[in-house]
């Protein structure tokens, strides 16, 4: 298995712990990429394929955009950016190539020469909330190999940092509706961070269903629902793609209806929505879960958007939880909204799990 090592920065780049670092700035979706211009022409296709992969919302959007920088002297003006990447090879003698070479200590260089490491990471080097990634191999051929073979791992470093920033922002913003959070915990044995502009649209103990809704700005909506099933002895039967899709459609047909009650939300009932429906096994707050990502729409095709669901089992409560976030924002780019609502879902906590006290 390939090992990834934290980057070793020589003293030229070390910043004293006593120095006050500024907060990282810039667009979350831009990756400032320092790369020699000639090397870039040779690797730009796999590099863009790694980071500029499409997210269908339903319009195709790229979560990240590569912003190439071909002159190393611009680094002083860009040290506060959130996402910075250096891409080079040990045999590259350009200014950027030499800069990257000097970032490696002898042990790290040896690992690169042996092709035992190619990806190095440093967080908060010049600014708080910053991630710096160095992709370096002994030659172009080896670099191209990793950009193809290890593209998902490389991508996830930036994606996970984006997600972490959003989660930190949720917890630090304050103004959450603590009374509603306490109400959910006392009544149902779970809680979730309720931002100040969310409200309860449906609360049914009988149906074991809670719907939180946000309608600001007026032409944008975000929905979150929590559904649970009690006294589950065999949870594995619920980790089933067919059951998950059918259960979501059952819930949204009942609760996610238009104001005239003549249309409702559906997924996976036409070739287009099935095409963009993905199921992944993941770790959700320390539990095995199935993550679902795809597109929802009204059954009369009058609107739609992206959604994310998690289905997991709580051992202490003997419950299956189905939590879901949806977005309706026809006039807006939605890639950031998808990350934001995913982070909000990850604030979900259950009683007796030890999670609640940690926040």
Image: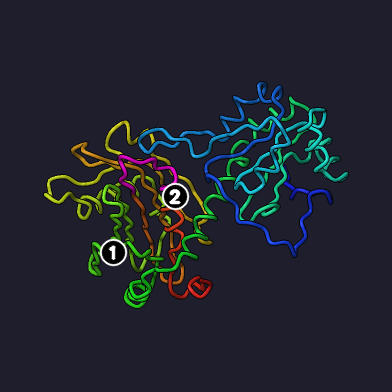
Circle count: 2
Residue 192 position, x and y percent, is 40, 66
Residue in the picture at 38% in, 61% down: 321
Query: Is 170 displayed left or right of 120 in the figure?
Result: left
Number of other residues with Cα within 10 Å of mark 2, as a class: few under 14, some 14 to 19, many 20 or more: many
- Nearer-the-camera pick, 259 or 207: 259
Residue for badge 2 = 291
Per the rendering, the mark at residue 293 is none
The answer to whether residue 248 is above or below residue 19 is: above
Q: Secondary structure at mark 2?
A: strand
- Nearer-the-camera pick, 69 or 294: 69
Task: Give the residue at the far right of this rendering.
Answer: 106
Residue 290 position, x and y percent, is 45, 51
Residue 217 position, x and y percent, is 30, 52
Residue in the picture at 54% in, 35% down: 65
The answer to whether residue 58 is above or below residue 130 is: above
- Nearer-the-camera pick, 346 or 135: 135
Which range of residues does the magenta coloring cover?
A: 327-339
Comparing labels 2 and 1, the label whose residue is closer to the camera: 1
Residue 287 appears in the picture as rendered: no
Residue 110 magenta-drawn?
no
Residue 337 magenta-drawn?
yes
Q: Quadrant of the N terminus?
A: top right
Q: Quadrant for residue 241, please give it.
A: top left
Residue in the picture at 60% in, 56% down: 23
Per the rendering, the mark at residue 199 is 1
Number of other residues with Cα within 10 Å of mark 1, as a class: few under 14, some 14 to 19, many 20 or more: some
Q: Secondary structure at mark 1?
A: strand
Q: Quadrant for residue 133, please give it.
A: top right
């Amino acid at each position: 298995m390939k090992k990834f090592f934290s980057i070793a920065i020589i003293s030229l780049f070390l910043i004293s712990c006593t120095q006050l670092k500024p907060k990282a700035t810039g667009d979350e979706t831009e990756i400032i990429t320092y790369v020699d211009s000639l090397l870039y022409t040779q690797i730009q296709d796999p590099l863009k394929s790694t980071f500029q992969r499409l997210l269908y919302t339903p319009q195709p959007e790229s979560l990240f955009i590569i912003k190439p920088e071909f002159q190393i002297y611009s680094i002083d003006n860009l040290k506060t950016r959130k996402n910075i990447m250096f891409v080079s090879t040990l045999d590259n003698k350009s200014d950027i190539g030499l800069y990257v070479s000097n970032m490696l200590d002898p042990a790290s260089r040896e690992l690169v020469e042996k092709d035992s490491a190619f990806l190095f990471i440093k967080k908060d080097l010049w600014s708080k909330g910053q991630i710096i990634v160095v992709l370096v191999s002994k030659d172009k051929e080896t670099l191209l190999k990793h950009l193809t073979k290890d593209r998902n791992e490389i991508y996830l470093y930036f994606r996970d940092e984006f997600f972490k920033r959003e989660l930190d922002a949720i917890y630090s913003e304050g103004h959450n509706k603590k009374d509603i959070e306490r109400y959910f915990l006392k009544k149902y044995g779970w809680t979730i961070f309720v931002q100040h502009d969310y409200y309860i649209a449906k609360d049914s103990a009988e149906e074991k269903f809670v719907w939180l809704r946000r309608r600001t700005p007026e032409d944008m909506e975000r929905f979150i629902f929590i559904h649970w099933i009690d006294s589950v002895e065999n949870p594995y039967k619920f980790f089933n793609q067919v059951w998950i899709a059918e259960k979501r459609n059952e819930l949204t047909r009942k609760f996610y209806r238009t104001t005239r009650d003549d249309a409702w939300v559906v997924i996976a009932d036409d070739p287009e929505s099935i095409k963009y429906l993905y199921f992944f096994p993941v770790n959700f707050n320390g539990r095995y879960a199935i993550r679902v990502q795809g597109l929802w729409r009204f059954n009369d095709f009058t609107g739609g958007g992206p959604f994310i669901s998690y289905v997991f089992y709580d051992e202490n409560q003997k419950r299956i939880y189905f939590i879901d976030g949806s977005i309706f924002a026809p006039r807006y780019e939605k890639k950031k909204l998808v990350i934001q609502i995913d982070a909000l879902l990850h604030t979900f906590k259950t009683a007796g799990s030890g999670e609640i006290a940690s926040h």
